[in-house]
Amino acid sequence: MRLSLRHTFVLLVGFASLLTSPLSGQERTGVVRLQVVPDRADWAYSLGSPVRFRVTATRDGHPFPIPQVTYKVGPEMLPPAEEKTVPLPGEGLTVQAAGLREPGFVRLVATATVEGQEYRALGTAGFAPEKIVPTVPEPPDFDAFWSAGKEALAKLPVDAKLTPMPESSNGRVDCWHVSLQNVGPDTTGTSRFFGVLCEPKGEGPFPALLQVPGAGVRAYRGNVEMAEKGIITLQVGIHGIPVNLDPPVYEAMGAATLSGYPTYNLDERDRYYYRRVYLGCVRANDFLVTRPRFDGKHLGVTGGSQGGALSIVTAGLDPRVQLLAPYYPALADVTGYLKNRAGGWPHMFREEKRRLAERIAAIPYYDVVNFARRVKVPGLYSWGWNDEVCPPTSMYAAYGVIPGEKALLLALETGHFTTPEQVKRVNGWLVDRLTAR
């Protein structure tokens, strides 16, 4: 490669600056952590009581003063009640905020810049969250609507097509790419529902677990780990496309035809995107319960975010489901923003006001809260209070109306992610319950 005279000059100047710039004998950078925590260990407060947040910074694990930190505090996901920029001393900063007189959450978000790097942290205080009441109404014909959908689905043969996946299989588990027939995007026509089936080798019989996906468009390889524990698993996609394609295919769809899919046709109850998805999860169970080595009884469902929502939806729609383990469920009490409080992902009522009346009329048929009212089987639910994708207000609105046996595994400081400890506890619970005889 030939360099021009101009490029050569720039290189020489740059090299010379390295030689001539002053260097001290020792310079320091480090791992900076900004942290916000409420002053109560359980982050929980009684209604009306104030909350004190501690804002601290450390570098390499030791207290670290920052010239300026900006904090915003107020009800989660809503405009802040207070915003200030102040110095952050090494010993930290205490911010007192007014509590809530109604059940909900107060959140403090802190931001700072250190050596050109931006840092952000948040902490969330809960006020009687177990008493949060949903804002979404329950349609009187909710059950009739979904019964009609399941009847339409039952008229279609499963028409399962299986293709071996040797790249996912191993000495203990066999895997297949699966295509199933499903209802169409409205009350007419058909579509396909795809996933990856993993079955333990051996005579069985085995329990079964449906794994439903978080939001997005991607490939899947199957839940081999749980299959190795003696459970038939079916990990599904929701978009009516194969789940074994090359990554660029999903990237292109996610940026184009499937961009914004959570609100597609939201103003038309019978054509909303999730109608086919919810019924597709029932169709996945239609397939699982017909596997020759299924034990005929133990069927569970699990997933996170959108998958947490689909876990609750599937358990509410399908009486064959015996247990569920949702992480941070989405699509719950999404009308919260219309009542001046946080609503669930995808936050379609936070700023979007187009065709509002039609959307408000349709969404109660799809909101997770109304499926949660119909979940009568045991469930282990898990989330954190710092979640900004699926606000805890929305998740508690659904959790509070579940009539079945339930337990909540909290990882308070987590946002929209899981810790290894959470996953170990939840998977252990699933294995114990599914393999019980």
Image (cartoon, grey):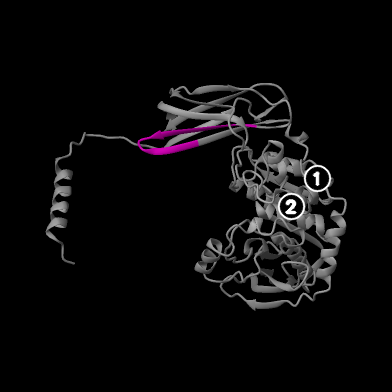
Above or below — where is 213 with respect to 368?
A: below
Check disc 1 and give the amino acid type: Pro
Number of labelled discs? Answer: 2
Measuring 47% from the left and 29% from the top, which residue is drawn there?
Answer: 70
- Residue at image point 65% right, 56% down: 262
Given residues 330 and 230, the one toward you in this image is 330
The magenta region covers 106-120
Percent across and percent down for residue 119 are 45, 37
Query: In the rendered image, is residue 178 in sight?
Result: yes
Whole-angstrom CA distance, mark 1 to mark 2, is: 14 Å
Q: Which mark is residue 358?
A: 2
Q: Nearer the viewer, residue 77 or 413?
A: 77
Query: How many residues crowd around disc 2 within 10 Å: few (fewer than 14), some, or many (20 or more)?
Result: few
Indicate yes or no whether the magenta region holds residue 1. no
Assign the magenta stretch its main secondary structure.
strand
**In this image, 376 relative to 71: left or right?**
right
Q: Which disc, if any, is residue 137?
A: 1
Q: Residue at x 68, y 61 (%)?
A: 229
Mark in the foreground, 1 or 2: 2
- Picture quarter with the C terminus: bottom right
Percent across and percent down for residue 57 are: 46, 30
Q: Amino acid at mark 2?
A: Glu
| Magenta span contains residue 117 | yes
